[in-house]
Amino acid sequence: MSSLLTFISVNDGKIKRSSLEVLSRCREEAERLGLDNEAVVVAPDASNYSEQLSGYGVSKVYVVEDPIFKNPLNTPLLKALDAVIEKAAPRVVAFASTEGSKDILGALSASRNVPALPDVSSFEVTDSGVSGKRPVMAAKILSSVEAKGDTVLVSVRSGSYDLTESSSEPEVETIDFSVSEEEIKVVLKEILSASGDRVDLSEAEVVVAAGRGVRDEEGREMISELASVLNAGIGASRALTESGAYDPSLQIGQTGKVVSPQLYIGIGISGAIQHVAGIMNSKVIVAINKDPDAPIFDIADYGIVGDLYKVLPPFIEEIKKLKVS
Amino acid sequence: MKFYICIKQVPDVNAPLQIKEGQLLQDTDRMILNAYDASAVEEALVLSEKHDGEVEVVLIGPDKAKETLRKALAMGADKGTHIVTEDESYDSAVYSKILTAFFNDKEYDYIFCGKQAQDTDSGLTGGMLAMQLDLPYTTNAVGMEFENGSILVKRQGDAGQEMISVPSPGLVTCSNDMNEPRIPSLKGIMQSKRKPVDTISTGDLGLSEDDLAVRTQILSFEEKPEREAGRKFEGEPDEVAREVAKLLDEEAGVL
Ligand SMILES: Cc1cc2nc3c(=O)[nH]c(=O)nc-3n(C[C@H](O)[C@H](O)[C@H](O)COP(=O)(O)OP(=O)(O)OC[C@H]3O[C@@H](n4cnc5c(N)ncnc54)[C@H](O)[C@@H]3O)c2cc1C
Ligand SMILES: Nc1ncnc2c1ncn2[C@@H]1O[C@H](COP(=O)(O)O)[C@@H](O)[C@H]1O
């Protein structure tokens, strides 16, 4: 029981930034306590990531490689993690909080009979387990929580920790893996991907988010143009994912995603607590809303009171100018 | 086709709250049916109307949570079980253990849970329960239909949606992006009063105090670091738009 193990999420050949944030935190904790900082990659091309991980002070990488991991299925992933945890016997298994990790955290906690602290915004390793802080009540307040156990599962909200680098030559250990069709139990029929070449919202440095105030095609075109000028990810409030104006995977908030950009611009969004729950890790918040009393202004660093249809054209034009100069 | 829906009574996050010496004080009159569970009930009702099914709800909670069970019955669920516990320190692991004991001798096609409780956002109970009952499962459903005797779930993943077929018996956790839960009608409310509700204890399920020991705990609550309201710009759209753009560049340095 002398290591901390970070689960590394990968997407299109790249390690997700949120996993590296978690790994950076685990390295700090491992150094503080004199523990090993280890990582696990479960993917069809899992062994390709050791080099990227060498920049983060990892001593060992567990690799589970199988074509089945191309598909987002919970049973094979659970089986793989079960084998790695059995082998590594870590004090902590830390995940970035994603829909992928949420899919397995409860089941893994039950199958390993270890406690889990989901969606923390900070954590530390203690003698008896893990303590941390989690936002609750739609992120209106923070709770201090603790979990007691020899191994504790933790998932961490994106944007909670900065990336810190430190080079190492990780040892690679490949874990044998196979899974039969009966074990998988559920059948993946199809993956309906949101249009592929967009900036990934949860990793985006800049997020442009549209709300109900964006009421037509003209408004959505302005949103797209602003996003393209800023090289931003496009997000939306529930009002616009529900109406079908935007893809559901773009929803930001309690039901949707937590974003952690340098710059978030909310346009025609009132700032309901369930939406705000997903944007509090943004560095700078800008709001454009015609209602001077909209709650989003209570948390915006820069609030523009005005009709978005009148504000956006000169805003976009000015940003274009500033970007060129 | 038999559905069981696990429902939880939660405080309304919109109600005013106060923190005193690390304790959370809130209006106990403003308790509601967890929004994600309401979507799970709604979806089960729609499926059972189409495929001639039966919907039962099960709730673990204090005596006063019965009103939430009644709400689900008023929406149209056929029957309810209230597992009464007054202990407020239970975590998802304990709730999943109690549910596991409850389901052990039951027959069903599908169990639906919410994807998370809207006050704590834990999102663990469904996966724990599926593992303990050895059921195939998927999470974060945004749509469902029957196909060849199995439920075909549209699951919201990180990048897009995944169509996953879950055979019976199985478990699905539901997002509130799936539907608009019906508001109980007056007739529904009247009928709910005559619907059967079993009231049982954890002891009735053969669980001891030791079985219900928690390994995770909330120690205290605190205000989150204040995000101060910044500056508000009102006036000629052209001018304020340009001014804020410049400030983002020069002052905030984020362009
Ligand atoms: C359990 C639960 C989970 C939820 N999860 C989420 C979530 O993850 N994400 C989320 O977003 N919501 C979520 N919601 C819904 C949330 O409560 C709000 O209903 C939603 O965020 C409102 O979206 P909106 O701000 O776009 O719309 P509205 O609240 O209708 O606000 C529209 C705003 O646009 C402004 N406006 C209108 N026209 C213009 C114009 N021409 N120019 C400028 N401004 C204009 C208006 O002044 C108004 O402030 C959840 C709710 C529940 C109960
Ligand atoms: N006390 C409870 N009674 C019945 N179902 C529950 C209870 N607690 C949790 N659940 C179910 O588990 C889901 C997830 O809860 P949680 O793990 O607390 O986020 C809820 O949406 C319910 O479906």
Image (cartoon, rainbow, N blue to C red):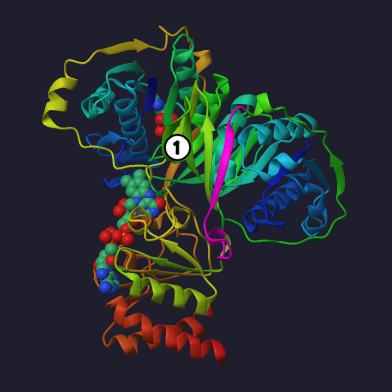
Relative image position of residue B149 (x, y in whole percent): 47, 24
In what element is the residue under mark 1? Answer: loop
Question: Residue drawn 70% across and 42% down?
Answer: A69
Near-viewer residue (B126 or A115): B126
- Range shown magenta: A185-202
Specify few, some or many for label 1: CA neighbours under 10 Å numbering under 14, 14-19, or 20 or more: many
Question: Residue drawn 38% across and 87% down?
Answer: A314
Question: Residue drawn 44% across and 88% down?
Answer: A318
Q: Indicate which quadrant contains ligand 1.
A: bottom left
Residue A52 is left or right of residue A148, and the answer is right
Kind of residue sitting beneath label 1: Lys
Q: Is residue A252 magenta?
A: no
Near-viewer residue (B147 or A38): B147
In this orientation, does residue B12 appear? yes
| Chain letter behind tag 1 | B
Relative image position of residue A220 (x, y in whole percent): 38, 71
Find residue B238 and report its image quarter: bottom left
Question: Residue drawn 64% across and 34% down?
Answer: A152
- Asked if residue A19 is positioned above or below residue B110 in the image, the reply reads below
For disc 1, the marked residue is B115
Residue positioned most to the front: B148
Q: Is residue A193 magenta?
A: yes
Relative image position of residue A204 (x, y in whole percent): 56, 65
